[in-house]
């Protein structure tokens, strides 16, 4: 994470009225890093992933190797196949 990387894609974060199901392992791994209220809000957010061309919950995007940062409702993505 120390290297500077350029964002190939700027992906908008969208909000859903329903929560997305995430695996228990991903939820537990993020509990120590992210606060409870933030994690609860993130469960309602999703992105249209440019790498897989599919809709993904934001938590999956956050734990992806292409994730660089989240700024003002957008995800900066490297866009490389993993």
Image: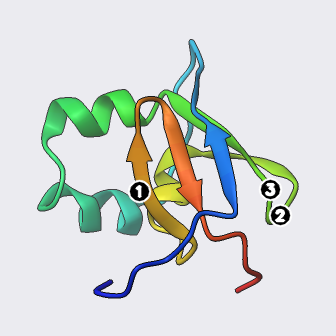
Above or below for 40 versus 80: above
Q: Quadrant location of residue 27? A: bottom left
Closest to the observer, 37 or 69: 69
Q: Nearer the viewer, mark 1 or mark 2?
A: 1
Q: Residue at x 66, y 43 (%)?
A: 11
Q: Which residue is mark 3?
A: 50
Q: Which quadrant: the C terminus? A: bottom right
Above or below for 13 versus 7: above
Q: Quadrant location of residue 18? A: top right
Q: Residue at x 69, y 64 (%)?
A: 8
Secondary structure state at the residue bearing disc 2:
loop
Secondary structure state at the residue bearing disc 3:
loop
- What's the CA distance linking mark 3 and mark 1? 15 Å
- What's the CA distance linking mark 3 and mark 2? 6 Å
Q: Residue at x 33, y 83 (%)?
A: 1
Q: Position of residue 55 (x, y in %)?
A: 76, 44
In this rendering, position of residue 3 left or right of residue 62 = left
- What's the CA distance linking mark 1 and mark 2? 18 Å
Closest to the observer, 76 or 35: 76
Instruction: Pick whichever of labels 1 and 2 is earlier in the sequence.
Output: 2
Instruction: Tell me if mark 1 has few (under 14), some (14-19) or many (20+) residues whose alpha carbon lies within 10 angstroms of its own.
Output: few
Q: Residue at x 72, y 69 (%)?
A: 79
Closest to the observer, 70 or 22: 70
Q: Which residue is mark 1?
A: 69
Q: Position of residue 71 (x, y in %)?
A: 40, 40
In this rendering, position of residue 32 left or right of residue 38 = left
Instruction: Tell me if mark 2 has few (under 14), some (14-19) or many (20+) residues whose alpha carbon lies within 10 angstroms of its own.
Output: few
Instruction: Pick whichever of labels 3 and 1 is earlier in the sequence.
Output: 3
Q: Which residue is mark 2?
A: 52
């Amino acid at each position: 994470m120390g290297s500077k990387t350029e964002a190939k894609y700027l992906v908008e974060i969208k909000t859903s009225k329903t929560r997305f199901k995430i695996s228990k392992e991903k939820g537990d791994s993020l509990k120590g890093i992210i606060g409870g209220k933030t994690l609860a809000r993130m469960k309602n957010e999703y992105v249209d992933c440019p790498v897989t061309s599919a809709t993904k919950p934001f938590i999956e995007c956050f734990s992806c190797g292409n994730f660089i940062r989240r700024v003002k409702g957008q995800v900066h993505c490297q866009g490389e196949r993993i």
